[in-house]
Amino acid sequence: MNGKIRDITITAMGAALLCILAPLSIPVGPVPVSLATLAVYFILYVLGMKRSVVAIVVYLLIGLAGVPVFSGFSAGVAKLIGPTGGYLLGYIPLALIAGALIDRYYKNRIICIAGMIAATAVLYAIGTVWLAYAANMEAYAAIQAGVIPFVPFDLVKIVLAAAAGPVLRIRLEKTGLLSPAVSVEKVQG
């Protein structure tokens, strides 16, 4: 398969994975627990940082256009600029931060877990500031609503992605669906 066609196809598949998993959510207050972050963590392993960011932007544009791909099968401008919009937009810096480390060290689970935790903290910060502003909440209340309930779930998602992500990436490379990655570990080891 042509490299450009393969890249476009696999990026579209990443956006599709987000569109399928992100609407599945459990309401726990103003911010629901969804599978969106799990999808983001997995596409970082499979697509790499650059294609993951494109897949996330495509996902956000699909939701912005009115297709119900956000948590709870919601969509539209109101969702994106509403109280949880910061968490949605926070997927982009999450992908940039965690993706940079996963691209370089995808076989080193400790570095990847640390990168995903740090990137998730940035997601929380952006989302919480946005939530506090949009919902006219005090910072502590926004943290209680938008961070505390999600930490255990996101830690489990991070561990799942770190356990399965490298295996999935290697298998997709062996099938030819992905180009083999050149990581710092391969160059140094």
Image (cartoon, rainbow, N blue to C red):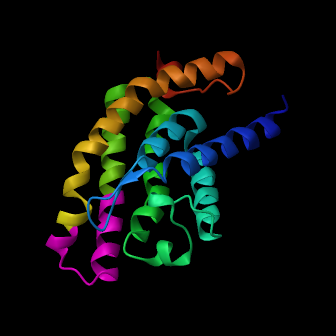
Residue closest to the eye, 11 or 76? 76
- Does the magenta-highlighted stretch encompass residue 132? yes
Question: Which region shows up in magenta?
Answer: 123-142
Across and down, in percent, residue 130 comes to 35, 74
Instruction: Give left or right: position of 36 versus 171.
Output: left
Look at 50% across and 46% down and name the residue there. 21
Q: Which image quarter is the N terminus in?
A: top right
Residue at 85% across / 32% down in the picture?
2
Q: Does the rendering let one see residue 176?
A: yes
Find residue 172 and report its horizontal and vertical position in percent: 63, 22
Does 46 appear above or below 142?
above
Residue 152 is left or right of residue 175, and the answer is left
Which SS type dominates the magenta stretch? helix
Q: Considering depth in this image, is 124 or 137 the residue closer to the camera?
A: 137
Q: Judge from the rendering whether residue 51 lies leftward or rightward of residue 24; answer left or right.
A: right
Give the residue at the far bottom of this rendering: 136
Instruction: Kindly identify the residue that appears in the image at 45 percent across and 30 percent down.
Output: 105
